[in-house]
Amino acid sequence: MSSPAAAETAQPDILSVEGLTVAFETDDGPLTVVDGVSFGLQAGRTTGMVGESGSGKSVSALALLGLLPPNGRVAAGRAMYRGADLLALPADRLRPLRGDRIAMIFQEPMTALNPVFSIGDQIAEVLQIHQRLPRGEAWERAVGMLRRVGIPDPATRALAYPHQLSGGMRQRAVIAMALACGPDILIADEATTALDATVQAQILELMTDLQRQYGMAVLFISHDLGVVSALADDVVVLYAGRVMECAPASAFFGRPMHPYSQGMLETLPSLTPPGHDLPTIPGTPPDLARLPGGCRFAPRCPRAAEDCRAAEPPLTETRAGSRAACIRPGPDWDPAEDPT
Ligand SMILES: Nc1ncnc2c1ncn2[C@@H]1O[C@H](COP(=O)(O)OP(=O)(O)OP(=O)(O)O)[C@@H](O)[C@H]1O
Ligand code: SF4
Ligand SMILES: [Mg+2]
């Protein structure tokens, strides 16, 4: 599926995800937690992925990278990257792409860092493995990357072990490692959530600068709509494992089409300052093992009517470049005029 931006600019997607479906084996049988998710990423653009806790953001990212936990499996879908379907690639062909062409940053930097090696060693090793650089050159490049991400005195800091750095410096080191090979795609899953506001702002600025320099596509997963509004070119909204809306950020934040998006944005006090967690709208997400029939948002939707419960609404174009999974989308819905 092409991204909203593709409609705006006719630039092809670097990653095109179609119908991604992930199921987990649980004690109560198989559970589908990501259900037919489609979106596209484009070079030089950031796609913000938002949704309540448990909506399937991390599982979607992990599935793309072949990193699902042992009880998880991709049940359906395609993720086309440079002519190859990432979801169908054998592990030995996916592994070399990971960390080289497709990089990732997670919330907790220590998950990406090995406590017993210096950060310089770890970045140099990535370059030695993926780019086959000789040791000396890899070390030089590692120090250069640490300088680029704003680590002071990088030649000395390269010798430091992860525990000798602050949380913010550690996340910078992880970003340096993720970007060392000049990836096409960066997946950042709550990458700044654990950092205090000042450090978070610095890291976000750094990511924007680096994206401008490298022109990579970024999938930015976050609870924080303020950050997403500041950073994203496009937005994908997940709810209980499905895409509810997929639109250019300006359209999404200006005139959201899906009632779920509208509910989120209405309760958000102000979009500009980062630091606003995803606002809570009345009700709770459905139990994935006991989904309601039809639209899974219906139990919380102020527009829900009988026809919403008949079938799951497909993601349908609502205006150029935007799609919503709703049979009654739009910003101008008036309950008094609804025929149902
Ligand atoms: N190993 C697992 N076995 C069974 N269910 C799992 C497993 N891992 C995740 N899930 C379920 O998959 C669903 C999606 O989880 P996911 O971690 O993708 O949510 P998320 O959108 O990233 O949430 P958060 O915002 O809290 O990070 C959740 O219902 C979660 O409980
Ligand atoms: S399909 Fe119906 S219940 Fe679902 S979001 Fe649209 S109006 Fe609400
Ligand atoms: Mg998550």
Image (spheres, helix red, strand yellow):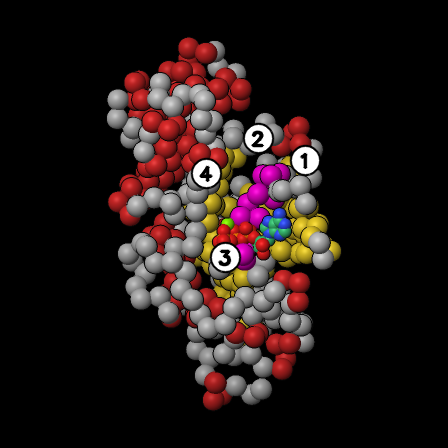
Discs 2, 1 touching: Cβ within 8 Å: yes
Determine crowd level at label 1: few under 14, some 14-19, many 20+ residues with C-alpha closer than 10 A: few
Query: Disc 4 versus disc 3: distance between alpha carbons?
Result: 18 Å
Label 1 sits on residue:
89
Above or below: residue 262 compared with residue 170? below
- Judged from the image, the quadrant occupied by ligand 2 is bottom right
Query: Disc 2 versus disc 4: distance between alpha carbons?
Result: 15 Å
**Which residue is more in the foreground, 193 or 201?**
193
Residue 229 found in image quarter: bottom left
Query: Disc 3 versus disc 1: distance between alpha carbons?
Result: 29 Å
In magenta, the rendered stretch is 53-67
Discs 3, 1 touching: Cβ within 8 Å: no
Mark 1 is on which residue type? Leu
Percent position of residue 145, x then y: 36, 25
Label 4 sits on residue:
105
Answer whether residue 120 is visible to the viewer in this image: yes
Mark 2 lies on a secondary structure that is loop
Query: Disc 4 versus disc 1: distance between alpha carbons?
Result: 22 Å
Indicate yes or no: mark 4 CB to ligand 3 under 8 Å: no
Above or below: residue 188 compared with residue 112? below
Which of discs 4 and 3 lies nearer the camera? The answer is 3
